[in-house]
Amino acid sequence: MGNHISSNAGPAGGSPSPEPLMQQQQHGDGNKSSSSPKEPGKVWNWKSANVKQTDVGDAVRIRKENTEEAWQKVLKWEAMRGNKSGDLRLKSFVGKENDLSPRARFRSWFGHELPFDRHDWIVDRCGKKEVRYVIDYYDGKVDVRPAMDSAANAWVRMRATCMRWKSDLIEIFNASD
């Protein structure tokens, strides 16, 4: 089971970055830590990592970049659903670094790398509906998609797959000219 953080905070009107919520993380031992260079090493103590104080600033910057990239991908998924209100916010997240997502497990069977971390994010759609997103973190890549826990999520993921295949085919045919 992962570690759960929730928040009711977030400005109305617009889609704020999830970073303020992500700055506080709860770990399995019940302790909370901030991803701030002011608290070197605390962020990684629960992962038993030996982190030098000089590396903390870079790690915090990378984490912020990954969080922002994941949020931008959530916004793209929401746009594909037709949600153009922009009034989305990260309500909560669960760190599941020890649980492989079904997609990550499947990909590993074919020799792809395993993610170094996983989060499940709960995104609040204007207070009307909550949607769970699965985020796998790889070296240099963030894989974001709606969880396959509803027919609507399954449908939007199938549509995205078809669009990706169509784009790949067009690229192949254009390259052969």
Image (tube, grey):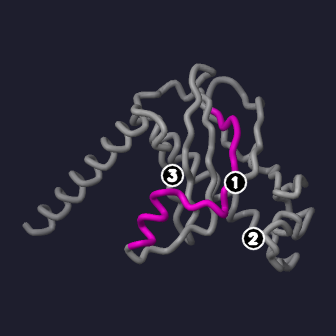
Which residue is rendered at x = 92% and y = 62% of the image? 38
Does residue 140 appear left or right of residue 166 in this picture?
A: right
Q: Nearer the viewer, residue 128 or 84?
A: 128
Which residue is rendered at x = 49% and y = 74% of the image? 113
Q: Earlier in the sequence, mark 3 or mark 2?
A: 2
Which residue is most to the left?
Answer: 177
Numbered label attached to residue 34: none
Q: Is residue 160 placed above or below 174 in the rendered structure?
A: above
Kindly identify the amino acid type of the residue bearing the numbered disc 1: Gly
Kindly identify the amino acid type of the residue bearing the numbered disc 3: Val
Mark 3 secondary-structure assignment: strand
Q: Position of residue 152 (x, y in %)?
A: 41, 32
Kindly identify the amino acid type of the residue bearing the numbered disc 2: Asp
Q: What stretch of residues is rendered in magenta?
A: 89-109
Q: Are marks 3 and 2 in contact (CB under 8 Å)?
A: no
The residue that mark 2 highlights is 58
Which residue is most to the top?
Answer: 128
Distance from Cα at disc 3 to Cα at disc 2: 23 Å
Q: Residues within 10 Å of mark 2 (few under 14, many from 20)?
A: few
Distance from Cα at disc 3 to Cα at disc 1: 14 Å
Q: Position of residue 53 (x, y in %)?
A: 88, 76
**Circle 1 or circle 2, nearest the eye:** 1
Q: Earlier in the sequence, mark 1 or mark 2?
A: 2
**Circle 3 or circle 1, nearest the eye:** 1
Which residue is rendered at x = 62% and y = 44% of the image? 121
Numbered label attached to residue 144: 3
The residue that mark 1 highlights is 95
Q: Are marks 3 and 1 in contact (CB under 8 Å)?
A: no
Does residue 116 appear left or right of residue 175 in this picture?
A: right
Does residue 42 appear left or right of residue 97 in this picture?
A: right
Q: Position of residue 75 (x, y in %)?
A: 51, 40
- Specify whether residue 107 is painted magenta: yes
